[in-house]
Amino acid sequence: MRLLYLDWPHLPHRIEAARASAPLPDLVVIGGQPWEPALVLDANTAAVRLGVRRDQPLGTAHRLAPEAHFMAADREHYARTMERALDALAHFTPGVEADSDPDAHTFGQVLLGIEGLHRLWGNDERLVGRVLG
């Protein structure tokens, strides 16, 4: 079986950046405010470089990156966005495997079954171009 693996690291941050009316700050932590008893859902790469990690308490993330912009996680919006992407990918192949739950550690990772699709979409390079385009 042939599979195509797609990976969108930091998908919650990417979704927030796409819907923001202005560019997001340089340091972003998604999950809530530092004083809330919650965990980091995502952070941008600048915050990750400072040690912020997924599933870390928000207070710990604040100690590592006190100047970061802390945002509430809009889990329903992230799930709907991922489901729309999966629906679009299902037009290429019925073999789509992914988790649309933003709390899943595999959120943003997709496996597509591409066995035999060259007859419909062309060679691998062309298929990938169509999927990503």
Image (tube, rainbow, N blue to C red):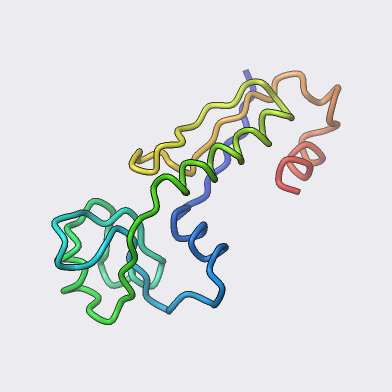
Decide which of 17, 95 is in the foreground and name it.
17
Q: Is residue 48 visible?
A: no
Answer left or right for 22 relative to 27: right
Question: Residue 33's x, y, as percent?
Answer: 23, 66
Decide which of 76, 85 is in the foreground and name it.
76
Question: Residue 103's x, y, as percent?
Answer: 33, 42
Residue found 29% across the figure and 58% down from its top = 31
Decide which of 27, 75 is in the foreground and name it.
75
Is 113 located above or below residue 65 in the figure? above
Residue found 82% across the figure and 40% down from its top = 126
Answer left or right for 69 relative to 33: right
Q: Is residue 30 visible?
A: yes
Residue found 54% across the figure and 45% down from its top = 81
Answer left or right for 95 relative to 44: right
Numbered circles on residues, count: 0
Answer left or right for 5 relative to 34: right
Question: Residue 116's x, y, as percent?
Answer: 76, 19
Residue found 44% across the figure and 54% down from its top = 12
Q: Quadrant of residue 58?
A: bottom left
Is 112 located above or below residue 10 in the figure? above
Quadrant of the frame with the N terminus: top right
Question: Residue 41's x, y, as percent?
Answer: 31, 53
Decide which of 107, 6 is in the foreground and name it.
107
Is 19 located above or below residue 46 in the figure? above
